[in-house]
Amino acid sequence: MKGWGANLGHDLRERKKALLTAIHALDLRVDATGLSPDEWLYRYDLEDQLSVIFSDDEAYWRLRGTQKWVLMGDANTAYFQAIANGRRRRNTIPLLWDGPALLQSPCDIWAHVDGFYRSLFSAAPWSGLSLAHDCWTGLQLVSDAENAALTDPFSEGGVWTAIRGMNPTSAPGLDGLPV
């Protein structure tokens, strides 16, 4: 995967280099002979393309770094790259013990962790135990209206409200990127 990721950025770096070369060539022509209106429009289009590439790159590293000082405008430096990559290494689980078995495959580790949390948050089978009916009284009881509100199905608006209320630079998902 690391080789694939390195090659993924290669095309972008080549595109950036080509755009900068074309802009530089047009700048040299401006000094020598001037540019026609169509050439000026072409130069502005090249600058727009370059601006999009730079802003996408900054957004990518902002998501990777999740450091507050990056959000406040610090430059995309080698120190920042080291922080982002160190965070990825620190958050990686290379192996996991499941009793006497050692899990090293990412699929096995994922299945074990997923199974653990599914069992942790699933409803326990009925054990026959219950609280005494007089354990809570009066205002401590959940009213029928409160119970109906608690058991209502999720609405799309409520889900979007919860998503928008999340910190956009925390808790990375399966793809490694946060919300």
Image (tube, grey):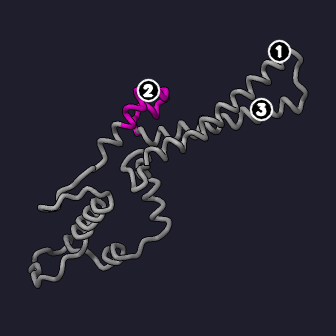
**Label 2 is placed on what type of residue?**
Ala
Q: Secondary structure under badge 1?
A: helix
- The magenta region covers 66-85
Q: Picture quarter containing residue 145? A: bottom left
In the drawing, what numbered circle is on residue 44? 3
- The question of residue 178 being in magenta is answered with no
In the drawing, what numbered circle is on residue 78? 2
Residue occupying image coordinates x 24% and y 52%: 95
Residue 7 image point, x, y percent = 53, 43
Q: Picture quarter containing residue 126? A: bottom left
Q: Residues within 10 Å of mark 1 (few under 14, many from 20)?
A: few
93 or 125, which is in the foreground? 93
Residue 37 image point, x, y percent = 89, 30
Query: In the rendered structure, which disc, 2 or 1, sits on the residue that comes first in sequence?
Result: 1
**Label 1 is placed on what type of residue?**
Asp
**Label 3 is placed on what type of residue?**
Tyr
